[in-house]
Amino acid sequence: MMTTFSHAKAAAGALPAWLLENKIVKMALAEKEKEIDTERQVLAKALTEAHQELARFHGEEEKDMAAAKSEMEAIEEKKKEILATHHTTLTKIRQDYAKVSRDISALEMSLRQSSDPAIIETIQFFRERLDILMNPQAIRRSVFRGLKNPVNFKREVSITSNETALHSAIDYCKSAISGLESMRLLSKCDFGKIEKLRKGIPSVSEFTVAEFYGQSFEE
């Protein structure tokens, strides 16, 4: 787009030299130059204002970034303060927890050492019974084999054993020992419960029968 200044230069360059000396032409050209000066002043002023506005935006940006940085630094300092406070609190809690745990261990030790001899004797009784029950010789098993089918070599097999009763008795003894160990931490011995535990051991003379029809290559 051609400005007033550009039009004025083009017009002056197109005129012959003798015409440029004409008074009216000179006045017209002078008026054009005045318009050009006015236009340039307006443009220069607008450019200055634009630069000033740009500088203002830049200043606001730097100010905002500085504020954000300051806030972030304040947050980091607050985080450090919070962590330090919680660390102190947590350290105190752990120290108190450890102390109470030591106190509990000491109290349990005292109660175990002074527990009634009847409890200790019964615990030993069940441990000895466990040794007997867990001995492989405690298992009693018998196998009955029916006639073999000559076509598919299968036969009826019946297995009678006391393994289920043994497992029940073993679990009972383990549970009894656990209960007696807890009783050592009580203020009084429950003699009635001890007697009941002794008498409640499941019998290992109960047998179960498992039958199946399967392949057998035994003679």
Image: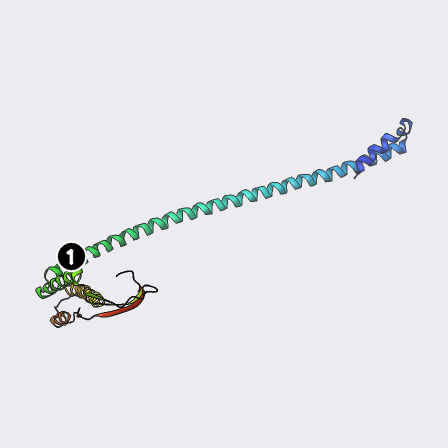
Q: Nearer the viewer, residue 59 or 211?
A: 211
Amino acid carrying mark 1 in the image: Ala
**Camera-nearest residue between 74 and 105:** 105
Which quadrant holds residue 32?
top right
**Horizontal relation, residue 22 to residue 186: left or right:** right
Residue located beneath label 1 in the image: 106
Left or right? Give the position of 60 relative to 78: right
Q: Secondary structure at mark 1?
A: helix
State the image coordinates of residue 57 (x, y, percent, origin top left). Answer: 59, 44
Q: Quadrant of residue 38?
A: top right
Q: What residue lies at 25% left-to-right and 70% top-to-bottom?
A: 209
Asked if 132 appears above or below 89 in the picture, the reply is below
In the picture, which quadrant includes the C terminus? bottom left
Q: At which x and y percent is residue 214?
A: 31, 65
Residue 167 screen position, x and y as percent: 22, 65
**185 or 100, which is in the foreground?**
185
